[in-house]
Image (spheres, rainbow, N blue to C red):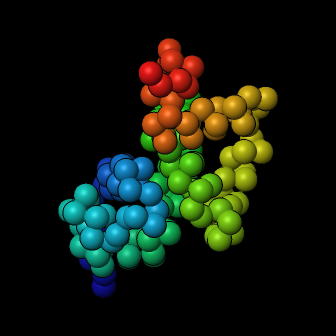
Amino acid sequence: MGRKKSFDQHIVVAQMSTVFVQRGFEGTSLDDLVTATGLLRGSLYSEFGSKQGMFMACLKANLKKQPLDDVTWRLLLVAMLELTSNSQAVNEIVSQWYAKQNSPNIATQLGQQLLKHSHILSGDNDNGKRS
């Protein structure tokens, strides 16, 4: 008989989300996720299957939030920049999210988030210009 899960998945997903936002998907190692969560590799693999499974759990959980917060926007950017062209599963998550958006300005919002993420747009009042 297997051991009972002794961690809160919501907390673990939040901890992993922070790491993926800070380091990106490719830049995140399993050691980074182990350190952030305090869990063993085996526990993470058992629960999520793979590093991509961990990222997908983070993305799905964060996309349920409305309105989207900074972490969610950044996870979307990581997904689009690093995974959607190579992972059908991640592509489907992002495509389904995009199809549900009612805002005609979603492309503008994504562009603003990309500029913010790359530190080109540093604040709300600078219109993307740095001094």
Question: In the image, is residue 97 above or below residue 120?
Answer: below
Left or right: 62 as drawn, with respect to 31: right
Left or right: 103 as drawn, with respect to 93: right
In this orientation, does residue 6 appear?
no
How far across and down, in percent of the image, does residue 56 sit? 53, 61
Question: In the image, is residue 93 above or below residue 131?
Answer: below
Q: Quadrant of the C terminus?
A: top left
How far across and down, in percent of the image, does residue 91 sit? 68, 61
Residue furthest to the bottom: 1
Residue furthest to the top: 125
Based on the displayed image, in which of its 4 quarters is residue 48 positioned? bottom left
How far across and down, in percent of the image, does residue 88 sit? 69, 69
Residue visible at 59% across and 64% down? 83
In this orientation, does residue 30 appear?
yes
The residue nearer to you, when weighing 118 against 50, is 118
Residue visible at 51% across and 49% down? 75
Based on the displayed image, in which of its 4 quarters is residue 24 positioned? bottom left
Question: In the image, is residue 46 above or below residue 130?
Answer: below
Based on the displayed image, in which of its 4 quarters is residue 29 positioned? bottom left
Left or right: 83 as drawn, with respect to 119: right
Q: Quadrant of the N terminus?
A: bottom left
The residue nearer to you, when weighing 91 against 60, is 91
Q: Could you tell me how many numbered marks the image carries?
A: 0
Residue visible at 53% across and 54% down? 78
The residue nearer to you, when weighing 96 against 112, is 112
How far across and down, in percent of the image, does residue 19 sit? 35, 54
